[in-house]
Image (spheres, helix red, strand yellow):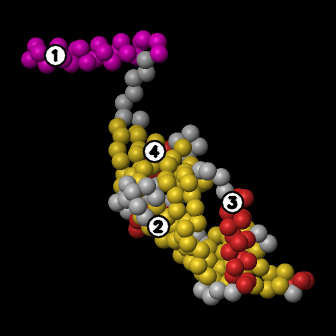
Amino acid sequence: MKRKFLRLGAGCFLAIITGLLPGVVATAGFATTVPVSADSATSIARSLFPISVASGTGTLFLTDPTVVFIDDRRLGLKVHFQAYENRPEMGIAISEKGQALVSGEVGYDPASKQVLLYNASIDELVFDSESAVTQRLRADIQSAWKAQFSNPIRADLPPHPLILPFRDGIQDVNYDRRSIYVQVVYK
């Protein structure tokens, strides 16, 4: 009994002293890692689609995103797209469909609460049919990619129900081929 009291007293003493010492902060909390499967990541991505992206003189309309785990470092987002350019005053009405895969290495910036995609690239850009028009559209898309995106690409955390409960505690996001791991600290 005396030994338990001494340990309890010593613990309380340390807690009080650390609270009084300048530069020492005592906090209580815990940390956990939340695994996110490709299916869950796809669900989160789908909550943000469809989206339109300017591409050269046209627009890309992106739908049906699917998150894919590529290798030990890279994960990807596969989408269906419609590339269109509509300028009736010039007699231009182009619409071509296809699929694209964008990949990169995931990271996180806790200060800005943004997901980062390092070394992002367009790995696939396939039109349903090939022609001189789709070759020009492909060149426009790749040129717009190089002009519009930096390294890393930054994206705000989406307001998805799977993320909202621990959004403010996210400290890092990692990936290891089997899952995306969200490291959360509760204070």
Question: Is the Cβ of the residue at disc 3 closer than 8 Å to that at disc 2?
Answer: no
Helix, strand or loop at mark 4: strand
Residues at marks 3 and 4, CA–CA distance in whole angstroms: 27 Å
Which quadrant of the view contains residue 56?
Answer: bottom right
User: Visible in this render: residue 58?
Assistant: yes
The residue where tag 1 is placed is: 5
Q: Earlier in the sequence, mark 3 or mark 4?
A: 3
Helix, strand or loop at mark 3: helix
Q: Relative to 92, say whether 34 is above or below.
A: above
Q: Relative to 95, say whether 24 is above or below.
A: above
Image position, residue 140 (x, y; %): 73, 71
Residue drawn at 72 percent across, 65 percent down: 143
The residue where tag 3 is placed is: 146
User: Visible in this render: residue 154?
Assistant: no
Q: Which residues are magenta?
A: 1-23
Q: Nearer the viewer, mark 3 or mark 4?
A: 3
Residues at marks 1 and 4, CA–CA distance in whole angstroms: 40 Å
The residue where tag 4 is placed is: 172
